[in-house]
Amino acid sequence: MTMDRDRILLTPGPLTTSLRTKLAMLKDWGSWDADFIAVTARVRHALLDIVNGHDSHTVVPLQGSGTFSVEAAVATVVPRDGHVLVLDNGAYCKRAAKLTQLMGRRATVLPFAEQEPVSPAALDERLKADASITHVVLIHCETGTGVLNPLIEVADVCQRHGKGLIIDAMSSFGALLIDARRTRFDALVAASGKCLEGVPGMGFVFLRQAILPGCAGQSQSLAMDLHDQHAYMEKTGQWRFTPPTHVLVALAEAIDQFVEEGGQPARLARYVDNCKTLLEGMGELGFRPFLRPEVQAPIIVTFHAPADARYEFKRFYDAAKQRGFILYPGKLTEIDTFRVGCIGAIGRNEMRQAVQAVADTLRDMGIASGAPAL
Ligand SMILES: *Cc1c(COP(=O)(O)O)cnc(C)c1O
């Protein structure tokens, strides 16, 4: 018999959402209707609350997955003759560099090791050496590995050099502290289906008010022009093109629960506990995390694949799925890994059950230990 029960997504978006958030989607909305316009305004206000950004920033929602908003941020904020330095310690950094290039902007990559945070000192050196750089792109939590990058230090270096900073905070926003009164950034990008625990389908970009007038006409794309989206939204309260209505009302409901839970500190505490429960349980099964604990963000954990010859990710994945848990493949090219997300509407119980599911899976596959080859 198959159970008609939602599987737990241990993936960093889409992720497991609460029933309340899912139920919010059972109604249709007219995009130009005053009720929907009010939801848009309420969500934008609540998002600015989260970063203490009301005095310094505005927030512009955009249809699409998170990458759409990263691309839109680059196209809107960086002049066509701008020069972007991408701090690269993983897959999402490489994606940001690629889309910057495809947007026709000059992009330079400053590479770092995948298991280490990017270095503010190295950034400082590079900015001293190359005055042509106009903007820096930082991925706050590099979801490819789970490594946490030093946001405040990088922002301070950029500010000292007078460079614009674009932050991809997709997998950290809502969970890790980001304070616009303390940390200066030109653009910060996140999305509905990550730590706010909404469903996927829209991103949002915080833009520094001071740079907004200069962004007019910089985007070579109509649909991705955040300046235009902002101007229209300020004037009419509406989105320029068909909005993801159900996604937005689900996000509004998810943000209500976020606030009720205790906001960012409470969300962080739950994810830290999830991550700890996961690391302890998997450790007992012999698994070894890819990152050292000091640089591990409590968002997603990369584990080395077991050394046992009977291990094969596809079978491992299918067996865990049978038990109700959806794992995530690794994103490293050199070594065999898999990832487990700590985010979503889940807590310690679900993480313990996930570890138990992995233990049962190993037993069924005849694998004595999750220990990797040394
Ligand atoms: C999820 C994520 C994105 C966006 O990915 P999409 O698949 O486009 O939603 C971008 N950057 C990071 C760091 C992410 O975790």
Image (cartoon, rainbow, N blue to C red):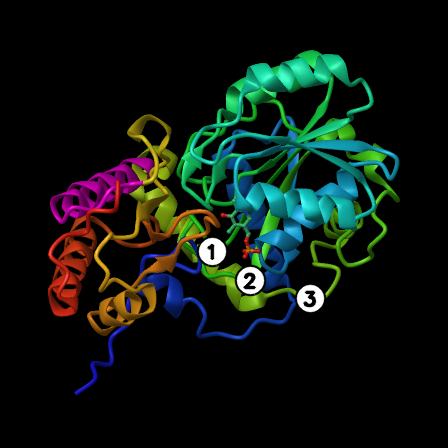
Q: Residue at x 33, y 68 (%)?
A: 314
Which portion, as a residue range, is magenta? 268-289
Residue 234 appears in the picture as rendered: no
- Which mark sits nearer the N-terminus, 3 or 1? 3
Q: Amino acid at mark 1?
A: Gly
* Mark 1 beta carbon near ligand 1 (under 8 Å): yes
Q: Amino acid at mark 2?
A: Gly
Depth check: give the residue in front, 272 or 319.
319
Residue picked out by circle 1: 193
- Which mark sits nearer the N-terminus, 2 or 1? 1
SS at badge 2: loop
Residue picked out by circle 3: 32
Q: Residue at x 81, y 41 (%)?
A: 105
Q: Is residue 301 above or below residue 212?
A: below
Depth check: give the residue in front, 271 or 301.
301
SS at badge 3: loop
Residue picked out by circle 2: 201
Q: Is residue 62 above or below residue 83?
A: below
